[in-house]
Image (cartoon, coloured by chain):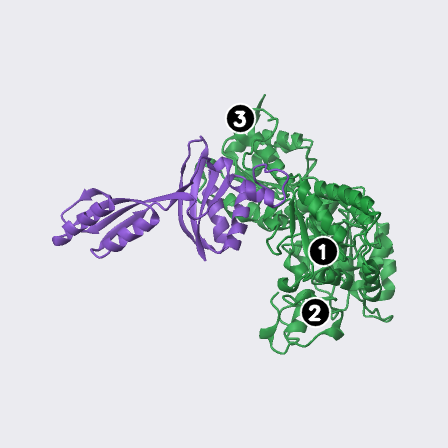
């Protein structure tokens, strides 16, 4: 069968099982948008390529499938750089397709030309420039294979316009041939046995669970391992929902704004079992004083993560699902031999006590001002079964702290890159991928303004979701740092509560705009938002700008020096001594 | 800081050199020398990279290199366990009595003269990097007009080729069930 390169592209997308793509057309990708009309692939027309990229990420997070976005050459591709970098940092499976100027003028500074494979080289798992349409189907297979297997990540496929128009004989390859790409998935059994021996001997073990557990769909296996081994679990920002927060073994989030139990359990642990986690600086704080008494079992599919920040006593390279299954089987065998779970001298009791004594806390005065934590807690009480998406900053930390996640893929955020503006487009993508679930974006006022245009996409494409803006009139996290570490010298952080008028802006985009300024109004507004089903809703929660995120481990400080609330802070008198973010 | 020699077997595809070099650049490592050429396998090239770096950051780079889709195999050569050679062309001033002394040095070092003019001699030097450094130190006294070096190339000593050795031991030590060939 004779097809054009553009037709081959969509046949390949169909062959890979793609149902939704997010994109914006333009000159160099024009030929591809014609066969799109006859394809089963549904295209969501975004308002900015960055939005399309984050939407593809949100789709991938929520569904576990590969997210796909399409953009034109030059500025179109350049606008995808941030989502690609975000997906690389957070191991999100994504394929980006870009148009390119025709091959005869590549390198000629042609109109809308950018060397997008060059530009995106350090922010993709891999990228391709397709120079012959006969290679297109094979390249697409490889792109999806690379994006979705091993440690997932973004792959970009750049297709010049003349290649899209080139006529070829269609052929769908059986598989891929990538001699340099064969991820190690099976964990070593000898290492597993050594690991289990350490678990049996440990008095204060902690399961340090990272985003890899969600990527590997290993939550069930983790649950069995934790329960049968009576092993307490911390879930990092990337792993929220991998283990139910409601369970007594759950210690919540560790790290810079983690809870006391999550942070201190690791500091006091004699064994860390790191599962798909990467000892990120936001988790470890000062590396040299992180978990000083702990031996480390480190399970990851990426050998480069093992030993990168913290030496591993027992490294295990493999798919975390495979390794957890093996750990579980071996642990059960050893526990049966030993007559049960080893006696651990009240470790679980201590942790339980810490959880009870040092919960996340805030004070909501009855007469206001409205506290952000209160708004989020009420939202949780009304809509606990939602998929939650967040931007980056204070609201992200509060959302992670106060929402109690019980299943994987219900928490979507930008962890590694910390991309402000992630929430709205990612919520769009998540809602497109999971029409059966309510999607709630908890966003900051600063973040919201970076990508709010995708509300238009939500309206015109009928992909509704709720956006709760924690509007504190500031770039709140930066403001918090200036308050704590720069002698309250506030520099360029004030945004204003009412410019723009978020409720009116929502209405202008065809969404429902609501507002709560007082704690008394919160419940009614949330109920009203939840009653709207056919349109997106934006709630403007006008919150207290002075509220800060606690607990806090200042960057570079030891996790032992966790500060539980504003009363525990030591003033920094010289900004030069302020911690480095 | 110490000097490390790494052999990297790669697919011969556009952009591979940029990908490999980019990994070093992204970590602020300066590549001392880099030599690339075809191998006996069609479609595969071999790079020899010499880099001045501490051992631990180097380990991170080799792991990252392994993750590149187009990288087939990496071998880090332990000092003394590889044969290493480099080729250099050097144009040196050789007038008057200096001429005979330059030719004498060439003789001692067993290097070839490729071109002679009234004023200069162009020499082809092959050998270990140490030998070339020694030769160059002597030639500098006469005045080096121009110098071009290929950078080091290396093969491990013993029977086995790069595809049968190298990263395997490290991978098993890192806890993999079996070495499947790299890439993550």
Cβ–Cβ under 8 Å for marks 2 and 1: no
Residue A523 at x, y percent in the picture: 87, 59
Q: CA distance from mark 2 to mark 1?
A: 21 Å
Q: Nearer the viewer, mark 3 or mark 2?
A: 2
Give the color of chain B as drawn: purple
| Depth check, front residue: B115 or B22 | B115
Name the N-terminal-most of marks 2 and 1: 1
Please tell me whether mark 2 sits on a helix, a strand or a loop.
Answer: helix
User: Quick check: can you spot residue B133?
Assistant: yes
Give the color of chain A as drawn: green
Q: CA distance from mark 3 to mark 2?
A: 65 Å
| Vertical comparison of A393 with A217: above or below | below
Q: Which residue is mark 3?
A: A167
What crowding class fits label 2: few (fewer than 14 Cα within 10 Å), some (14-19), or many (20 or more)? few
Check the image and name the residue furthest to the top. Answer: A1
Residue A250 at x, y percent in the picture: 80, 55
Please report, as a chain letter, where disc 2 is located. Answer: A
Q: Residue at x 63, y 74 (%)?
A: A486
Work out whether disc 3 and disc 2 sit on a shared chain.
yes
Q: CA distance from mark 3 to mark 1?
A: 60 Å
Residue A552 at x, y percent in the picture: 71, 66
Q: Residue at x 69, y 69 (%)?
A: A480
Q: Which residue is mark 2?
A: A561
Q: Which residue is mark 1?
A: A271
User: Quick check: can you spot residue A71?
Assistant: no
Q: Nearer the viewer, mark 2 or mark 1?
A: 1
């Amino acid at each position: 069968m004779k097809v054009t390169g553009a037709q081959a592209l969509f046949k390949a997308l169909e062959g890979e099982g793609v149902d939704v793509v997010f994109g914006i057309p333009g000159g160099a990708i024009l030929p591809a948008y014609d066969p799109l009309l006859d394809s089963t692939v549904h295209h969501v027309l975004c308002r900015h390529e960055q939005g399309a990229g984050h939407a593809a990420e949100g789709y991938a997070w929520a569904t576990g499938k590969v997210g796909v976005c399409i953009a034109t050459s030059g500025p179109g591709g350049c606008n995808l750089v941030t989502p690609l970098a975000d997906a690389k940092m957070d191991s999100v499976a994504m394929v980006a397709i870009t148009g390119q100027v025709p091959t005869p003028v590549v390198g000629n500074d042609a109109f809308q030309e950018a060397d997008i494979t060059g530009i995106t080289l350090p922010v993709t798992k891999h990228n391709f420039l397709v120079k012959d349409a006969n290679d297109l189907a094979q390249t697409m297979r490889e792109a999806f294979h690379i994006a979705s297997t091993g440690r997932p990540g973004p792959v970009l496929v750049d297709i010049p316009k003349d290649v899209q128009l080139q006529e070829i004989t269609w052929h769908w390859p059986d598989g891929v041939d990538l001699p340099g790409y064969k991820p190690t998935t099976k964990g070593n059994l000898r290492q597993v046995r050594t690991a289990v021996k350490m678990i049996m001997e440990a008095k204060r073990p902690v399961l340090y669970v990272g985003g890899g557990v969600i990527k590997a769909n290993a939550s069930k296996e983790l649950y069995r391992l934790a329960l049968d081994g009576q092993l307490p679990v911390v879930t990092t920002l990337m792993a929220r929902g991998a283990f139910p927060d409601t369970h007594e073994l759950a210690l919540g989030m560790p790290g810079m704004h983690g809870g006391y139990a999550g942070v201190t359990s690791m500091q006091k642990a004699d064994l860390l079992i790191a599962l798909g986690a990467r000892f990120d600086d936001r988790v470890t704080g000062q590396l040299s004083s992180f978990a000083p008494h702990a031996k480390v079992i480190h399970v990851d599919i990426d050998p480069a993560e093992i030993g990168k920040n913290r030496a591993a006593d027992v490294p295990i390279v493999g798919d975390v699902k495979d390794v957890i299954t093996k750990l579980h089987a071996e642990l059960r065998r050893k526990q049966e031999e030993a007559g049960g779970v080893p006696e651990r001298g009240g470790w679980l009791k201590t942790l339980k006590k810490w959880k009870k004594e040092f919960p996340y806390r805030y004070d909501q005065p009855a007469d206001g001002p409205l506290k952000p934590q209160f708004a989020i807690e009420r939202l949780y009480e009304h809509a606990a079964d939602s998929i939650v998406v967040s931007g980056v900053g204070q609201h992200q930390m509060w959302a992670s702290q106060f929402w109690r996640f019980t299943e994987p893929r219900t928490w979507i955020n930008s962890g590694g890159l910390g991309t402000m503006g992630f929430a709205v487009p990612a919520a769009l993508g998540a809602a497109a991928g999971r029409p059966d679930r309510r999607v709630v974006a908890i966003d900051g006022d600063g973040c919201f303004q970076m990508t709010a245009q995708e509300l238009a996409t939500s309206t015109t494409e009928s992909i509704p979701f709720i956006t709760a803006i924690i509007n504190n009139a500031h770039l709140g996290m930066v403001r918090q740092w200036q308050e704590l570490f720069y002698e309250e010298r506030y520099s360029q952080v004030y945004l204003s509560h009412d410019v723009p008028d978020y409720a009116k802006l929502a209405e202008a985009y065809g969404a429902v705009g609501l507002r709560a300024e007082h704690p008394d109004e919160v419940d009614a507004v949330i109920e009203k938002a939840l009653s709207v089903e056919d349109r997106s809703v934006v709630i403007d929660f006008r919150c207290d700008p002075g509220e800060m995120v606690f607990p806090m481990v200042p960057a570079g400080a030891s996790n032992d020096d966790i500060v539980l609330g504003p009363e525990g802070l030591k003033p920094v008198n010289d900004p030069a001594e302020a911690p480095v973010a | 800081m110490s000097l490390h020699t790494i052999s990297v077997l790669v697919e011969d595809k556009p952009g591979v050199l940029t990908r490999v070099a980019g990994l070093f650049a992204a970590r602020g490592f300066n590549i001392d020398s880099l030599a690339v050429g075809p191998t006996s396998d069609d479609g595969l090239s071999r790079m020899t990279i010499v880099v001045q770096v501490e051992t631990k950051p180097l380990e991170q780079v080799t792991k990252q290199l392994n993750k590149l889709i187009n990288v087939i195999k990496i071998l880090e050569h332990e000092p003394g366990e590889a044969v290493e050679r480099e080729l250099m062309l050097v144009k040196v001033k050789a007038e008057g009595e200096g001429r005979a002394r330059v030719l004498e040095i060439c003789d001692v070092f067993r290097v070839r003269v490729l071109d002679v003019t009234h004023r200069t001699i162009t020499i082809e030097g092959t050998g270990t990097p140490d030998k070339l450094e020694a030769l160059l130190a002597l030639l500098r006294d006469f005045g080096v007009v121009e110098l071009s070096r290929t950078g080091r190339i290396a093969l491990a000593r013993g029977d086995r080729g790069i595809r049968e050795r190298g990263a395997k031991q490290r991978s098993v030590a890192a806890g993999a069930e079996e070495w499947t060939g790299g890439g993550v």
